[in-house]
Amino acid sequence: MKTLRGIAASRGIAIGPAFHFRRADLSFERRTVEDPTAELARFQAALETAREQLADVYAKAEAESGAAQAAIFQAHALMLEDPELLDAVRTAIEEQCINAEAALSDAAETYAQMLETLDDEYLSARAADVRDVAARVLRILLGVAESPTANLTVPSIILARDLTPSDTVLLDKSLVLGFCTAEGGATSHTAILARGLGLPAIVGAGPSVLEIPDGAMLVLDGGDGTLLVGPDEGTVAEYRARQAAATVVLARAREKAHEPAVTRDGHRVEVVANIGNVEGARAALEAGAEGVGLLRTEFLYLERSRLPDEEEQYRAYRAIVDVFGDRPVVLRTLDIGGDKDLPYLDLPHEMNPFLGLRAIRLCLARPELFRPQLRAALRAGAGRNLKLMFPMVATVSEVRAARAVLEECRAELLDEGQPVAEKMEVGIMVEIPAAALMADHLAAEVDFFSIGTNDLS
């Protein structure tokens, strides 16, 4: 028996034969075109077909794994509208007179490599999404069908160098027990989809995965990232017992999800969720969450070419607080800057990005970012239990400045006759040492703290 270890991407145990995922060959000839206008039309037609395909993929993903996971393909559709990417392709076709395949491949790879250089695991993982979208359009241009598992006839564990989100959502759950990839990370959209689909998964297990023969018996543990190749009967029996036990535990957890959490000595504990969109809100409520302890608002700013306006933010925040009714929802203002960059913000490079122009400092310096978000939050909180939280606070003066802007926005909205939250509690993230050391002074300025143990440690 051989043991391989990778990154645990999606919990669960799968037992079955290996099946190698073999993607279609997308190689092409780089050539000069005599009629760039006709080539542009060919590229545009491929984009239209790709948009239609993504609408179908979104519907399939939503039906099988929920809207939260399906939203990945809405982001893919937005990439097909990205002016920077599309302009690069069109310019190459017009000025270099090269075929659409070459122009698209060059532009997408340049964009993907730029994302990979970002010092942020989530944003750098989006390079795979860019390549996935480009491959979809490339398949259309080349007339290549999507059928990498056409020969899969028995329930199996999929092995691959990597899987794109599109690959993952098209897997037939009746025949796919789980998957293990040689590359990839836990924050990739592929890993997120696997969790939504309930497929046990391991990523980043190394090139040895590709050497496993088709049909070899495997045991995959997505909880600890272990892949067993050629296990004996005793090991298989042990893991089947673990499968059965996990099924029982999950069933019991679902039964008790909406009961109050009480310790053995009678202490009531409020259980709230960390979420990033309305789909996550619905899933959290269904799982028994009593509110939201952290609503990450960055989801509105990522994977797009412009800032979201006030109205778009208002609709998104209001949809989330409406899910929870009177339950508390804590909205964290934009935590971006430093190591978390957005291409359209044109932020300066800094020697120490964690202590530079980031989060609350960036928002105070860039009112075009801060004021629309505060106005949207005040409007969304009308008649609801919405609270506001400022990230990366280091000083009392930052809190006072942020609260002053909040009150200015409230006054503006009232003058405009807009309904706003009558009272909105304001808190801060305590996630840098300076804030922890002066917590007593900061406590006098805010209604609550949220302790960011990851950053403090």
Image (cartoon, grey):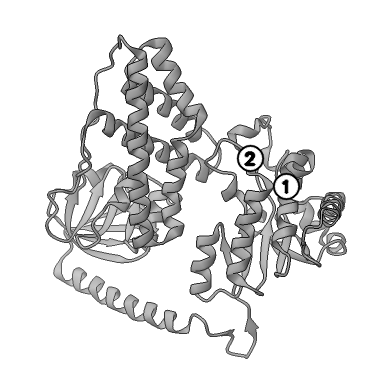
Closest to the observer: 93 or 276? 93
Which residue is situated farthest in the front direction here? 417
Residue in view at x 86 percent, y 61 percent: 445
The answer to whether the residue labelled 1 contacts the one labelled 2, judged by CB atoms less than 8 Å apart, is yes
Residue 34: x and y in percent read: 30, 9
Residue 97: x and y in percent read: 36, 11
Residue 430: x and y in percent read: 73, 58
Q: Which residue is mark 1?
A: 372
Residue in view at x 15 percent, y 66 percent: 232
- Dividing the picture into quadrants, the one containing residue 325 is bottom right
The total of numbered circles placed on residues is 2
Considering the numbered disc 2 on the image, is that residue within a helix, a strand or a loop? Answer: loop
Considering the numbered disc 1 on the image, is that residue within a helix, a strand or a loop? Answer: helix
Work out which quarter of the rendered image holds the N terminus and state it: bottom left
Task: Kindly tell me whether residue 183 is visible in this rendering.
Answer: no
* Mark toward the start of the polypeptide (1 vs 2): 2
Closest to the observer: 251 or 382? 382
> Eyeballing the image, is 27 above or below 383?
above
Q: CA distance from mark 1 to mark 2?
A: 10 Å
| Three-letter code, disc 1 | Pro
Residue in view at x 30 percent, y 11 percent: 32
> Eyeballing the image, is 436 above or below 38?
below
Q: Which residue is mark 2?
A: 307
Closest to the observer: 280 or 381? 381
- Would residue 134 be found to the left or right of residue 424 on screen? left
